[in-house]
Image: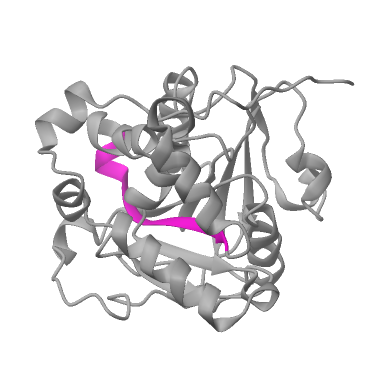
Amino acid sequence: EFRLGICTSLPAPSTMAPGHEHNHDMSATSAKLPVVVLTGYLGAGKTTLLNYVLKEQRDKKLAVIENEIGEVSVDDALVEQKPEDIAEELIVLDNGCICCTIRGDLQKTLQDLVKKQEDGKVKLDGVLVELTGAADPAPVVQTFFMDDDVKRTFYVDNVIALVDAKHCIEKLDESKGDPNEKGTACAQIAFASTVLLNKVDLVDEARIVECEKRLKEVNRSVDIMRCEQARVPLDKLFNVRAFDLARVLDENYMDEEEFHSFYKPKMDRSISNVGVK
């Protein structure tokens, strides 16, 4: 399921993320709305972070787009606030995983947001896209570069990957060992600009250091933040201009044409679902 709600959120903007020495073209994106893509393997803490964001929000309007791989929305039960309490409107699309079959619906939803923003029906400060744990974020990122209307209105501000410190090594080993069938975990790290190494209270320092080392082997330039209960200051996640497509493609040994034309999403095909209503 793919769901859109409008809620209040986002902290005051900053100009650059800590640790990012490269310069961004501020003039090109100053009039655009920031988009944060939230990814991470199943159980890493994405919905915990979403709940935290929804609780901490105060005065800005944020469109929250949620994706479920099955017909029954699990996140509806996990998100602590009722949809009617956070949403001015609700769009439900149930075509499956956003990283493959649903990308056209994501594009249409964003185009609808563009039109409503231009017509004054909504006034947004940004967009948060929460992906299913089985999703490769790369094709979602593509959506914001390939459609002219979407590209004119939005820019990818940050791609945040939640990583469970307790199971990080096993997931990376599994993903690296079988990239065709279980490649999602590595793909999520490879396309991230920020990693939240979550649940660090459940492991010792040696395990945390090993996780950080392994994460850097997948993505040398990613910023890693340690956290518990997916809690970090929101001003380190939003309006930080952390995502740099050229840098990410360089890490993955691709140019932009290859990315847009030939990239094949990494899917964990070991995951299946059954919906019971």
Residue 188 picture location, percent across and down? 42, 46
Task: Name the quadrant of the N terminus.
Answer: top right
Q: Is residue 85 magenta?
A: no
- In the drawing, does residue 225 fall left or right of residue 227? left
Residue 10 picture location, percent across and down? 52, 67
- In the drawing, does residue 4 fall left or right of residue 127? right
- In the drawing, does residue 205 fall left or right of residue 31? right
Q: Please give the count of numbered marks on the rendered protein.
A: 0
Residue 109 picture location, percent across and down? 49, 29
Where 93 sits versus 34, above or below?
A: above
Where 175 sits versus 92, above or below?
A: below
Q: Residue drawn 35% across and 77% down? A: 14
Q: Which segment is the magenta one?
A: 150-164
What is the quadrant of residue 255 in the picture? Answer: top left
Task: Name the quadrant of the C terminus.
Answer: top right
Q: Residue drawn 78% across and 40% down? A: 76
Q: Residue drawn 54% across and 40% down? A: 131
